[in-house]
Amino acid sequence: MQGHYMLIFERNSELKIHLDRIRAESRQIGFVPTMGALHAGHISLINESKKRGLFTVCSIFVNPTQFNDKKDLENYPRTPQADIDMLRQSGCDALFMPTTEEVYPKEDVRIFNFGELETVLEGAHRPGHFNGVAKVVSILFDKVHPDVAFFGSKDYQQVMIVKALVKQLNLPIQIVPCPIIREPDGLAMSSRNMRLTKEEREAAKLIPLLLNESKIFFKAQKPISEIKAFIASKLAQKSIYKLEYFEICNSESLQILTDKKEVKQGIALIACFVGNIRLIDNLILD
Ligand code: PAF
């Protein structure tokens, strides 16, 4: 496979030697942490880093501490060779693919506190998830020491957690949220999409459609309780869907809203099972 020359590291020590050299040349480092099974959404983050002229490091590590469901961890898609090929093609400069022992040489027992932010949405439905994200992101930041790190906005709440983490730990890292990349029918790109059956994939396109409808209703001043009831009733029509939550929140705090007047900018966020696959998505409502 032709493509850009990309270094691949499995060990922290080797990564560090190389990145020290890059910093000695006064180059800045852009970082894209991932769990692999890469798609165009991830590549858009690499592109954003490259566009800024940064030495671009991607990591692939399926982080066990952020999975509250063991089956979900076991079933998480892993496509390392295709990932490497995609990253080479994208112009990524270095890939860090550590083992679990390399990331967690001993158990990480830290407990983070993100206040209200971790009590809603994903925080409420996936206990311990954000604590695991905070653990791994802080460890990876410590290994890579990026100047800038890029995250996809599909995980909107995660971006806010990472921003809070950087603030709490006083890290000199700029966090750049990047737009959600969608399939032609609107479905937000996700590594989990590759696990959908044909029927589930077809059904999944309703999720972005409902987000768009909620935006139209929100703009038309429809009461939030009615918008929520509408979304729930649409998804209740077919047993393939199981709605976990649909909320309209303040886009700055993620505080759940009951009235449009409470806020400058609203955001609709959804988590819904399609068959056995849990999908999340969101849309700024204005
Ligand atoms: O968004 C992800 O893929 C993961 O949560 C992250 C940020 C790579 C941490 O494991």
Image (cartoon, rainbow, N blue to C red):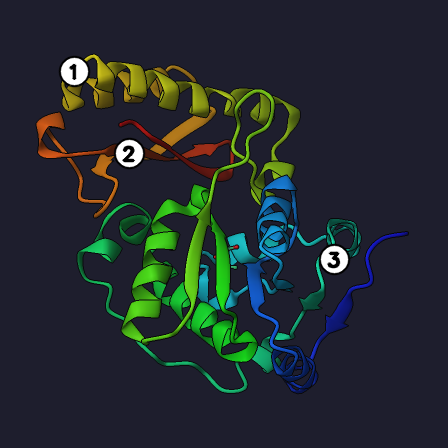
Residue drawn at x 75%, y 70% as measured from the top left? 8
The residue closer to the viewer here, 281 or 14, is 14
Disc 2 residue crowd, few under 14, some 14–19, many 20+, Cα 10 Å = many
Q: Are marks 1 and 3 in contact (CB under 8 Å)?
A: no
**Label 3 to label 2, Cα distance in Å?**
34 Å
Placement of 5 over or under 228, stated as above or below: below
- The residue type indicated by label 2 comes to Ile
Placement of 19 over or under 224, stated as above or below: below
Res 121 → quadrant: top left
Res 282 → quadrant: top left
SS at mark 3 in the image: helix
Q: Which residue is mark 3?
A: 80
- Foreground label between 3 and 2: 2
- The residue type indicated by label 3 comes to Pro
**Label 1 to label 2, Cα distance in Å?**
14 Å
Q: Residue 72: x, y in percent? A: 52, 52
- Foreground label between 1 and 3: 1
Numbered tag placed on residue 267 in the rendering: 2
Which residue lies most toward the top here? Answer: 220
